[in-house]
Amino acid sequence: MKRSTVDIITLGCSKNLVDSEKLIHQLEINGYKVTHDTENPKGEIAIINTCGFIGDAKEESINTILEFCQAKEEGKLKKLYVMGCLSERYLKDLSLEIPQVDKFYGKFNWTELLQDLGKAYYPELQSERSLTTPSHYAYLKISEGCDRKCSYCAIPVITGKYVSRPMEEIVEEVQSLVRKGVKEFQVIAQELTYYGVDLYKKQALPELIERLSDIEGVEWIRLHYAYPAHFPEDLFRVMRERDNVCKYMDIALQHISDKILEKMRRHVTKEETYRLIRRFREEVPGIHLRTTLMVGHPGEDEEDFEELKEFVRQVKFDRMGAFAYSEEEGTYAAEHYEDDIPSEVKQHRLDELMAVQQDIAAELSAKKVGNKYKVIIDRIEGDYYIGRTEFDSPEVDPEVLIPCAEKQLSVGSFYEARVVSANDFDLYASVLS
């Protein structure tokens, strides 16, 4: 019997990707052949896992849904289902406005999709998933939801209150993935530092990371999406002492002006932010900090923006992303502030801030020339092996390029390499062993 093919398209963040991987596993158990993010979808069924975080992400989700609606009308597709954050947020509106979609699901009830296909959902396999990443690394989601109430952010509206996964369940998942060959784990959550407060009545992230680092076969653990207020300081010790915990922290700071931080409801000050960055660099020598900043929040004037640029120049983040404020319904900012900064001003500020960071990135990359690093190989592209150091997260950070002609290397393996040259973003290296 020919197996039906399902195409799954994942939009948005790595947290969505984990949900897609769990769905893929359930579909495969039920006998489906599943493709993920293929450029030429050919299945009878398509499932779009949407993002609803900011305006651009919502637009991409809607456009993707409409493209697949067109394919369905042309007879290239039998069934179309939509799930994820956008669907969670606008379920009724989308159902009315896009009737070509067979059914919309929210972020948490996608298991009903299997029932609607006449298939079984296996709850005992809820932690099992089919990886869409290269087989040597995986994203590890340790919680859902967020209890922070930042003015601009719709995530709590979409995902609800913070729910930590039990440590034992996370440990079992990591052990299972290690048995399948995974060596590197990107630990993710809407907000890492709150982990455990609901379950254990304390910030339990340091303990969790210690337990994960004790698992044999875990080579790298990298932490994503921390919050600066009430940072769990024992994590400094864990990062310093554990060789397999990468000296890397992704901590979204958003702004530095006290006025804007207060308007953003971030519960942290300029002075506390600078102090936290100093602590990171003192307690965890060699750490690479990644942050995300926002321009154009209501009330941000030129003085606030200049303060933000000076912050970037002073701190010299190893990795930095930025985005422009977009008003999101249901948020504190949408209900209490006027979106008073023209879009062209926001874009100009964004471009200006990223130009400052580009110079810093080039300067920091150049300083790595001559240094030795442990590198994991992700793939082959053209004449190069493409790898990363412990300071580089997949998809978002610089990569290390090693000529294929130099030596035969294995994807998913670690090598010692020396950096021979650098550009603004990537490093070129030669393998030592």
Image (cartoon, rainbow, N blue to C red):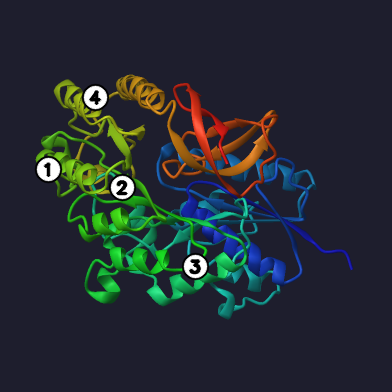
289 to 346, vertically: above or below: below
Q: Are marks 3 and 1 in contact (CB under 8 Å)?
A: no
Mark 3 = which residue? Answer: 216
- The residue drawn where x is 68% and y is 67% is 27
139 to 429, vertically: above or below: below
Q: Earlier in the sequence, mark 4 or mark 3?
A: 3
Looking at the image, the residue that sits furthest to the bottom is 124
Toward the viewer: 329 or 293? 293
* Secondary element at tag 4: helix
Q: Is residue 240 visible?
A: yes
Toward the viewer: 75 or 428? 428
Q: Are marks 2 and 1 in contact (CB under 8 Å)?
A: no
* Secondary element at tag 2: loop
Q: Is residue 84 visible?
A: no
Toward the viewer: 399 or 432? 432
CA gap, disc 3 to disc 1? Answer: 40 Å
CA gap, disc 2 to disc 4? Answer: 26 Å
- The residue drawn where x is 80% and y is 47% is 75
Mark 4 or 3: the one toward you: 3
* Secondary element at tag 3: loop
Local crowd size for mark 2, using a 10 Å CA cut-off: few (<14), some (14–19), many (≥20) = many
Task: Give the left or right position of residue 230, taking residue 168 as reference.
Answer: left
Amino acid type of the residue tagged 1 in the rendering: Thr
Toward the viewer: 30 or 63? 30
Mark 1 = which residue? Answer: 269
- The residue drawn where x is 26% and y is 75% is 200
Q: x and y percent of residue 189 in the render? A: 38, 57
Mark 4 or 1: the one toward you: 4
Q: Are marks 4 and 1 in contact (CB under 8 Å)?
A: no
Local crowd size for mark 4, using a 10 Å CA cut-off: few (<14), some (14–19), many (≥20) = some
